[in-house]
Image (cartoon, helix red, strand yellow):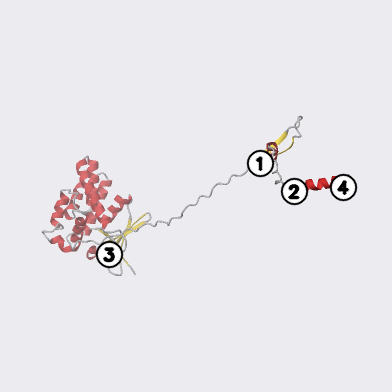
Amino acid sequence: MKKTYLLLYFLFFVFHFSFGQAPPPPPPPNPKDLKKEMISGEPDQNSSKGKTKKNIQKTESISPIEIVESKPEKKPVPHSVPKFPVALEESTNKNSIYYFKNIEERITKFDTLISEEQLISLTKYKIHSNTINPTYLDSLATKVYKLNEEKKYTEAIELAKAILIQSPNNLTGHKEISYAYKHSGNTDLENKHFAMMVKIIKSILKYSDGSIENPYILNNFFEGKSLYEAKFGCFPDTSLVLTTDKRLLGTFRCFHINTLADLTHWLPLLKKGDYNIQK
């Protein structure tokens, strides 16, 4: 009887082994068990009801990494000073738009359509023809500046007119007379001279940048002071230097701004001791 029982058990086992199915998957976790895994707690010793302090384990969120494409640093493009395109001979050619007398007439009529090239060509003509006296112009400019500071506007206007007779495109002359007219109540002439002053400044800065290679093109020394005051809002410290290549350079310093002007045409009117000599 025992052997028969064992035989039947063996046959039953072989049958299930041969045609058996895969063991069932493990049962899904109980939500309560998951909650317990996320919460750890110990009985609150201070509570009479045996409540549990729940310390929820917070998972740290990982922020996505933002990939920023690096761009090459943009370097400032240095100001390029163009070569002045007008030959000096054009200033004496009566058929040329650069004929000096026609340019002077247009300035006296406050023609702001006059070009930067025409204004600079007049300065170059005055310099090379020796038809201006930089010492005289500086003397008048110093006086008219002082008169405006003292609020003597009528006298300032007369002196500024004297500057513009000899040097019609003189920056100081137009700047100081515009200031005097403003405080005298003559708005019309104030605006006209101011517009011409702006035009002159643009012409200077277009064809020079105050560097050793491209010093400012000016009629006289005081014009550089007026340029600084109009453009940078400061009255600069100045000096004169005779370089080793025999150029007389005016230096202007205000804050961190240092610039130069070519005043070589003034050199014959100066004596040693009026300027420093470069060694």
x, y percentage for residue 114?
18, 52
The amino acid type of the residue labelled 2 equals: Phe
Snapshot quadrant of residue 184 = top left
The mark lying in front, picked from 4 and 3, is 4
Q: Quadrant of the C terminus?
A: bottom left
* Cα gap from disc 3 to disc 1, whole angstroms: 81 Å
Please report the residue visible at 24 percent of the width from the left and 56 percent of the height from the top: 138
Disc assigned to residue 17:
2
Lower position in the chain sequence, tag 1 or tag 4: 4
Please report the residue visible at 69 percent of the width from the left and 36 percent of the height from the top: 32
The amino acid type of the residue labelled 1 equals: Gln
The mark lying in front, picked from 1 and 4, is 4
Q: Which residue is mark 4?
A: 3
The mark lying in front, picked from 2 and 3, is 2
Disc assigned to residue 248:
3
Lower position in the chain sequence, tag 4 or tag 3: 4
* Cα gap from disc 1 to disc 4, whole angstroms: 61 Å
Kindly check if marks 2 and 4 are in contact, taking CB atoms under 8 A apart as contact. Answer: no
209 or 21, nearer to the observer: 21
Q: Quadrant of the N terminus?
A: top right
Q: Which residue is mark 1?
A: 57
Lower position in the chain sequence, tag 2 or tag 4: 4
* Cα gap from disc 4 to disc 3, whole angstroms: 133 Å
